[in-house]
Image (cartoon, grey):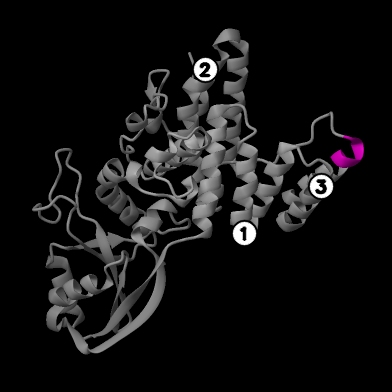
Amino acid sequence: MDPDQYLGESLLEQIEKEAESEGERESDLKVAARGPLLYWMRRLEANMREPVWLRTNWRLIRPDESIEADVASSWREALRLSAHGRWRRAAEVFAGLIERLPENPALWWNKGLCLARYGRLEEAAEWVRRYAERVEDEAAAVDIEAFAISLIEAANPSMITCNRYSYRIASRTRLVERLASAPSVQKMQEPDGSHRWVLVGQPLQQGQPVGSETGDGSQLYFAIAAIRMVNDRVEIVPTVDESEEARRQFLAIVGDAIDVGSERSESFQQLTLRARFEQPLFGACTEEILIQRREIVQRYRARYEQHWAETRFNCLDGKTPREAYEEAQLRRRVRAALWLVEQRFFAMGSEPPALREQFGIDPEPSWELDGHNLKEVPPSRLPYLRLD
């Protein structure tokens, strides 16, 4: 087991024990711990190899003592299969058990999670959502609904066709000099010590120059293309939907340092900028993570605050969050969709937009715990904090 994952589970067990020992304060402690715990688990997720919609340490449910012996035996066999990564076979076993125990919610959950593990995402979402309807704890049910929404989003990514361009280098010296002197180009270092260039676009605020600072000193520009030198050619690969604009800016910067007549172009599919926020990529290099963080903070905080509540979503049966929140059967799903938005901002190191107050939903628990801000505490120290 991964050491960080073990620490996370130990922390969860410790909090549960402390909460149980407090008697009447149990529910208050669990509510107070929920926000910090979720942040802690998000910190662990960054090092996991699973897709983002499976990075929440979900576990298959074991059979309880009331289950008949032969059913429990098959149940444990499915758990054994899943432990060896045989998710498809495990899902088939759980499907057979559901035929015998059609009203057992734990089997719905287990089948849904197994289906998700081997790629049948939309079908998995149906079983996960069905299970969420039977979960009594509201906070847990919201998280499970959010998981179901993530599965649907992952199954239907929004793609766009972009072009990558390459040119023969006429003078490497002039090319490097012009890239280095251009205010809209940044040099970035890779983990292996090599370098690449990044073309940055205009900031979100109108009339503010590229690279200018906000009141807190943070940079406002965002990357629109990566520039790579490969042997005797230089290529420009767009990182957002504006491939033609990126090409135009690049040609204006480099001038005669390249042979424009040697242009080659190649089409490729990539997630749209919005989809990359809704479904953050896993296994991304450092540069891509930085690019996503800038784009999210600059382009989407204001948009979510202004437009999210009035946007129609398939996961809300085609209704806007504001319309869906008026219907009792969809209210939990709105909370789940809102929590997903917040979670993605947290994952990028940014505070989420203020959406809860629009629906009269209580804010998440404070990140303060035992006099510490959980965002600033190293993961190795988290298990030693008390819940006093």
Q: Earlier in the sequence, mark 1 or mark 3?
A: 3
The span shown in magenta is 68-72
- At a point 62% along the width and 44% down the height, the residue shown is 128
Tell me: residue 49, above or below residue 41: below
Indicate whether residue 194 is drawn in magenta. Answer: no
Q: Which residue is mark 2?
A: 29
Read off the residue under disc 3.
Answer: 99
Amino acid type of the residue tagged 2 in the rendering: Leu
- Residue 1 relative to residue 195: left or right: right
Q: CA distance from mark 1 to mark 3?
A: 22 Å
Give the residue type at disc 1: Gly
Tell me the quarter of the image containing the N terminus.
top right
The tag earlier along the polypeptide, 2 or 1, is 2
Q: Residue furthest bottom?
A: 261
Q: Quadrant of residue 215?
A: top left
Q: Nearer the viewer, residue 337 or 375?
A: 337
Q: Is residue 92 left or right of residue 178?
A: right
Q: Is residue 170 visible?
A: no
The residue that appears at 19% across and 50% down in the rendered structure is 220
Label 3 vs label 2, nearer the camera: 3
Q: Quadrant of residue 163?
A: bottom left
The mark that comes first in sequence, 3 or 2, is 2
Does the CB distance between marks 3 and 2 fall below 8 Å?
no
Q: Residue at x 32, y 37 (%)?
A: 351
Q: Which residue is mark 1?
A: 119
SS label for mark 1:
loop
Q: CA distance from mark 3 to mark 2?
A: 39 Å
**Whole-percent x and y of residue 60?**
69, 41
Residue 173 vs residue 72, the one in the foreground: 72
State which quadrant residue 27 falls in. top right
